[in-house]
Every structure is written in structure tokens, then in C-alpha cells.
Image (tube, grey):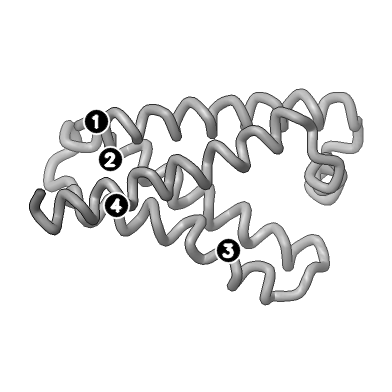
Amino acid sequence: MQAVTKAEWILRIAVAGEFIGHGVFAMQGKKDWIGWFAQFGVTDAGLAAQLLFIVGLLDVCFALLILFRPVRVVLLWMALWGFWTALIRPLVGMPIWDFVERSANWGAPLALLVLVGWPKQWREWLK
């Protein structure tokens, strides 16, 4: 197996594991995360739990997709979403180190995107 192929598979598994783990927590309605919705204007805990479930389901679906095929637009989404969810921590009052600690949450999907190749044309985002 070529080194690039090994690295790609390691990143695919790492990205999938991270998004499956967080997705399952979200689908279970992790209490802290539901509370964070109020910081952004969603004060109804029931609605926050529903939104969190949908986000979690998307995380799991995208994670499984990446295991089968690293679609570039999904990897970009995962990198941006991972960055945002890491950034939420200091925005809700947690130490900046909670953001720093989660660098791999967005760095791994971004690294995989770079490894599979940054698209040169719009249609390549779907490959």
C-alpha cells in the first residue's frame, strides 16, 4: 500500500470517528450543547434538542460517507463545522484552550481534503 493511501485511510478513519462520536452525542441531546443554543438565540430547549439531533444525524451520515468516498464538499463542510464547533467553546465562556484542544476536529478533515486534492473546478467539489 502506498504511503499516500495509508495516510488517506488513517485520516478517513480519524475524521469518521470524530464525527460519529460527536454526532452520537448530539443525537443523544448532550445537555451542555443544548444549553449553548440559548447563547445564539434559541431559548426553547425542545427546539434546541431537535436541531441538535438533526446536526448529529448529519455528522454521522457525513462520517459514514467519508469512509466510503471522501467527497470534497463534505470534507470542506466538516472542516468548517469542526472549526465552528471548536470556536463555540470560548464564545460560551470556556477557556481558549478548549478551542485549541479541538484543532484536530477541523484540521483532520482539512488535511484529508488537501490530500485528496483541492478542486480546480466547481464540479470537482462533488468528487
Which residue carries the number 4 mark? 112
Marks 4 & 2, CB-CB < 8 Å contact: no
Q: Which residue is drawn at 16% across and 36% down?
A: 124
Vertical arrangement, residue 96 with respect to residue 89, above or below? below
Residue that badge 2 annotates: 72
- Whole-angstrom CA distance, mark 3 to mark 4, is 16 Å
Q: Contact (CB < 8 A) between labels 1 and 2?
A: yes
Which residue corresponds to mark 1?
Answer: 126
Residue 96 lies left or right of residue 48; in this view the side is: left
Residue beneath the point at 62% across and 31% down: 55
Are dots 3 and 4 in contact, CB under 8 Å?
no
User: Of the numbered discs in the image, which one, if any, rests on residue 113?
Assistant: none
Relative side of 99 to 4, left or right: right
Q: Where is residue 106 in the image (x, y as percent from the top left)?
A: 47, 57
What is the three-letter code of the residue carrying label 1? Leu
- Residue type indicated by callout 3: Arg
Marked residue nearer the N-terminal end (3 or 1): 3
Q: How crowded is mark 4: few (under 14 residues within 10 Å), some or many (20 or more)?
A: many
In contact (CB < 8 Å): disc 3 and disc 2: no
Q: Find residue 89 and report its image quarter.
A: bottom right
Using the image as rendered, state which of residue 126 and residue 121 is in the foreground.
Answer: 126
Distance from disc 1 to disc 2, alpha carbons, whole Å, reads 6 Å
Q: What element carries label 1?
A: helix
Circle 2: residue type:
Arg
* C-alpha span from label 1 to label 4: 15 Å
Identify the residue under disc 3.
102
Ranked by sequence position, the earlier of labels 1 and 2 is 2
Q: Which amino acid does label 4 sit on?
A: Leu
Q: Distance between the residues labelled 4 and 2?
A: 9 Å
